[in-house]
Image (tube, coloured by chain):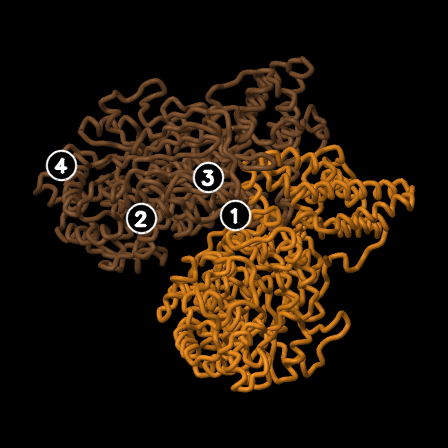
Chain colours: A orange, B brown
Amino acid sequence: MARSFVPACVAASMAMLMVSGSPLALPAQTPATAAASAASATLTLMPVPSSMTLHDGRLGIDSTFRVAIVGHSDPRLERAVQRFITRLARRTDLNLPHTVARTADSAQLVVHAVSAGERVQGVDEDESYTLESTPQSITLHAPTTVGVIHGLETVLQLVDGTATTMFVRSVSINDTPRFRWRGLHLDVSRHFEPVDEVKRTLDGMAAVKLNVFHWHLSDDQGFRVESKLFPKLQELASDGDYYTQAQIRDIVAYARDRGIRVVPEFDMPGHATSWLVAYPYLASQPGKLELRRGWSGYGETFDPTRESTYRFIDRFVGEMTTLFPDAYWHVGGDEVGSKIWPQDPRIAAYMKAHGFKDSPALQTYFNQRLSKILTKHHRNMIGWDEILHPDLPSATVIESWRGTKYLGAAADAGYRGILAAPYYLDAMKYADVGYLADPLALTDSTSLPANEAASVLGGEAAMWSELVSPQTIDSRIWPRTAAIAERFWSPQSVRDVPDMYRRLRVESMRLEALGLQHETHVDRMLRSTMLDPSWQLLTPLFDAVAPVTLGQRIHARRTVQSTPLVQIADIARPDPPLRWTLQEYVSDILTNSAKSAMANDSLRAIFATWQKLPAVVTQVGATSPVIAQGGWRAAQSLAAAGTIGLAALDARDHDKPLPQSWIDEAQKTLTAIDRPQGILHVVAVPAVRELLTGTITPSAGLH
Amino acid sequence: MARSFVPACVAASMAMLMVSGSPLALPAQTPATAAASAASATLTLMPVPSSMTLHDGRLGIDSTFRVAIVGHSDPRLERAVQRFITRLARRTDLNLPHTVARTADSAQLVVHAVSAGERVQGVDEDESYTLESTPQSITLHAPTTVGVIHGLETVLQLVDGTATTMFVRSVSINDTPRFRWRGLHLDVSRHFEPVDEVKRTLDGMAAVKLNVFHWHLSDDQGFRVESKLFPKLQELASDGDYYTQAQIRDIVAYARDRGIRVVPEFDMPGHATSWLVAYPYLASQPGKLELRRGWSGYGETFDPTRESTYRFIDRFVGEMTTLFPDAYWHVGGDEVGSKIWPQDPRIAAYMKAHGFKDSPALQTYFNQRLSKILTKHHRNMIGWDEILHPDLPSATVIESWRGTKYLGAAADAGYRGILAAPYYLDAMKYADVGYLADPLALTDSTSLPANEAASVLGGEAAMWSELVSPQTIDSRIWPRTAAIAERFWSPQSVRDVPDMYRRLRVESMRLEALGLQHETHVDRMLRSTMLDPSWQLLTPLFDAVAPVTLGQRIHARRTVQSTPLVQIADIARPDPPLRWTLQEYVSDILTNSAKSAMANDSLRAIFATWQKLPAVVTQVGATSPVIAQGGWRAAQSLAAAGTIGLAALDARDHDKPLPQSWIDEAQKTLTAIDRPQGILHVVAVPAVRELLTGTITPSAGLH
């Protein structure tokens, strides 16, 4: 094997078919898929239900499969069932009729909801369901339509196949979410995302039972909603990239159909340049402003001292509440410059006259006014950490971008909170990092006290979009967000990382089947970059690298809004599956598991492939600066890692330990490789280091 | 090499990096990409311009690149330039400003149009342009904005790269299309295609300079346009899948921005069930009708004997002309049942009273009435073959689905024509088949006489949608349509198939970069089908199979509208690139070219991979009936082909001819394999047969 040039993506799969280096000897009795062969009690469900029991037996699915809706029904529930039938048909290759029965007699899936649930889905919506699957039928029971919507996703995740038929396993599930607020925050200001991208994001959210789409609709870089009262917002401050009111209504309805609330965020008084470009009289500073094109924060603000500001906001909120029915309105409130207001003589005089000792005090005044306006319009306020102040209404929610301890402070002040800090997708952390970050954890070993924990509504994954385009968004959000969604839904005790990665591999493909494009992302980007079949030779490189963290990338190469996001870090995935596969192989070898020989062969093939990467990058990069300049250091590093890995395997196999001096040098090399290689990060170091030292490091996943 | 398990997709690329089986010895001086290394005079342009001259020299592109618009400008031209800048930025990884100069001085690309062109683009629009690229600048000159739109696509196709920079080659191009009507026909009735799919189809069309989007909007299976005058059309006859009038306007504007006319087709008097479901009084037959769900034709018709029918059509056309500004209106007119009308006593009496001897005579009367209505609304009639009759207005255009000779007949009757017959994409012919089918050719060696040829406006690729879903449409249309587009645009003499395939590989990736999803199609479908990483093991199977022809597929497994199109033939591509690669390898070997040793190694690797496919399908198919049942026969066939291929190579290499009896048996096996294997067709037979016989067959591409 080691002699041939095999992309690592393929090598990983090949291992399944290989026995001790002889690819011809196929172990014919081994089931092909991890999905099917999983003896795991969690099957391939994601998120894992709060309670489930596996039974023997299966319900075969054929073209006689029928759904019945008994008990309550409503158009939303019926549409959910129709979508379910379409997806089940595509999953099973069966022509299933879309007619729905009203009695259980002749149906294989019986859906029984008690009520429609809340007219506008809220934080107290009952989202629970029970599922009883037997060899005769499946019964899905839920107090509300939202519970049914979640349960139908679970049924689809239970579908599996043999060579001749498709089936649903027998299982009893009693499921309810751990947290009531399970969100995805999407910034569409720094880079706009068209309606289609938003809709497929909502599809993905529904698949993993997220229930809040937090939509960051304005910031310094652009205003993204059509206002009929204040049309200059979209005319002067959007570059033409905004949602019409009809599109907003369409998206809100689309989300509601999937059990998802839409919480709009209009950031103020800071991160406000776009408003002020459109309506300069709102600004603290005089003079003409332009949309920000680069990174921003602590910049231009609303003028909190003028009544005209509040009249504007009042009318604006009144208009927008006709589009956004949710009970919550996100005011942003983050990163307001501390020096701006005192430096303006007029505002400084106002502050003095009214006894505001500093900018935060003035911002609190602004928030109180804002809060009154929201109350008038029957909306509760939610905002980032900075808005916390004891005088706000008790229904106010604090979203923390700084950590769980701030939620404790909010709880002490009587407010509920949600956590975003560890779930920033643009930080480019691996899936297991967000997965292991509990919303209630203060440190690795301590949690919020129970009285404070009770105030934590949940959490949000956050996709800020300085470095996200419509072409790359899926690959930045998915599949990592599926792991975070499980953290928000499943019991606190569900934190088996290997099992999570086993299920995430399957869920990731399910999401691609749903229309998301994160799995095909690298190949598509490489085709676009290379315009030549030789792009395939780069697969082993992109299997083993990730984008550097946000800070590292900004440091290496500053971008602005118009920078095309086709750099090598935009091609790379944040958590390439091979990283975890390497960990598994090394674990198999170091524990002398039954799979160690296969793991050894696979690793050797992968390491040998890495050794050739510098030549590949030189050759394939001959027509592409993106590849030649962006990939060179990572290719060199992987070649070095491959050499170290092969030496470590040889030493182990021949029982001839490497000299300590060689090991020391190799360790130094690995440390150097583990640093940013341009805007790429080589994900291979922990596994190779473990092989070298013979020791498994528990937290190898973090970077 | 032959010992390792290497997917054929990878093997093809590997060959580039291999010297006589030693993958470590990289020929570092060989440029990596076919695009860059092409000494060909056609570079990677598609379609090939009518006249071009290559020069030495290159214009480097960096972030100082600017575009100037001099001479005429208009919003359409400016939008085209903005899109060009965005695409160039993405192609080059450069942050290019979108500001456009108005003088040539400081610009690297100078765009000079003379006029906007026709207010509504018509068949006589001047689409020509000239392009002069030097090391200092590029000048694009065109009589109209449409010419500029085409020329900008050419500029993008001229962009290439080195390891450190991107550039445009120096070249002089004088380009004008051979045919004025270069269409893509899209049926959205059998299966609906949402707005996004239509728009990306239009993007693809613009990239290869097609200029007519022929939109088949009604048929027995569904009516797809919102009518405000006759709302039951969408309410009762669309299943909710239709375009709103706002969407139609949006798409028409989107097309016009790309130099594409939109010709609507509302098929009548046959293929008309959807109209009659909505408004039964229009029908020849009494009684309640339902939308057709299966295959159809020669079914329900409009009643041509009632004045109410013509009043309806008159009002409908009047409404629709506000949406569709094109001068042409396609009436369909195909496959009208010959027995329906005479069997109805009332209609039979009418025919007798008015002297219509048979159904075609009555249809002619209908067409004449229809034609008068269209004339009143300032529209010219276009229809399928069957509408041909001497009494129609001279501006009428005949579209032939039966062949070029019918265009001759139309020309003799004084009408112009366009050809669709050889360009039916659902027939699943390879790209070279449509490519070599000249619109003027009567047979392989004879063409229409000049007087008749002058009446041929062009041709249309036709995508009927019985077997097309939004998920599969890109892979059915592309990249084959790019080859057909070249047939319509480039000089008749441009028909070098190897050169076409060389350029098509590049163009196919350019189309994927533009947002089309045909290149990633197979991988996406396999992920969705398998939900397991083992899908990658199936790549060699799908590299070597295509869907059977339309007729063969219907014969094997009848589908209806609701059949999910996730069968194994829907995963397969119509013309997998490996087919042509195999032909090239065999040609290299049989001609003892410089590349014959490399070709030998590559073929051995591919054949060895095929031999393992039955085991792969058994194993990977263990959880998937689609794979296990659908792929088994093709896997067996490819294994047999691989064995024959390896034996033929061995015989050649060792100069030991195979026994004639063995060859005879192998020929029989190949003949059997060349027949449908379920709903798949193995594309490998011609290449293996050539290797076996030592003879290259010129028309090996056809099946």
The quarter of the rendered structure image containing the N terminus of chain B is top right
Q: Position of residue B418 (x, y in %)?
A: 28, 33
Residues at marks 3 and 1 touching, judged by CB atoms closer than 8 Å: no
Q: Quadrant of residue B239?
A: bottom left
Residue at which label 4 appears: B357
Residue at which label 1 appears: B95
Q: CA distance from mark 2 to mark 3?
A: 28 Å
Residues at marks 4 and 1 touching, judged by CB atoms closer than 8 Å: no
Residue at which label 3 appears: B556
Label 1 secondary element: loop
* Badge 2 amino acid: Leu
Of mark 2 and mark 3, the one earlier in the sequence is 2
Judged from this view, the residue extending furthest toward the front is: A345
Q: Position of residue B477 (x, y in %)?
A: 43, 40
Residue at which label 2 appears: B217
Crowd rating for badge 4 (residues with CA inside 10 Å; few <14, some 14–19, many 20+):
few
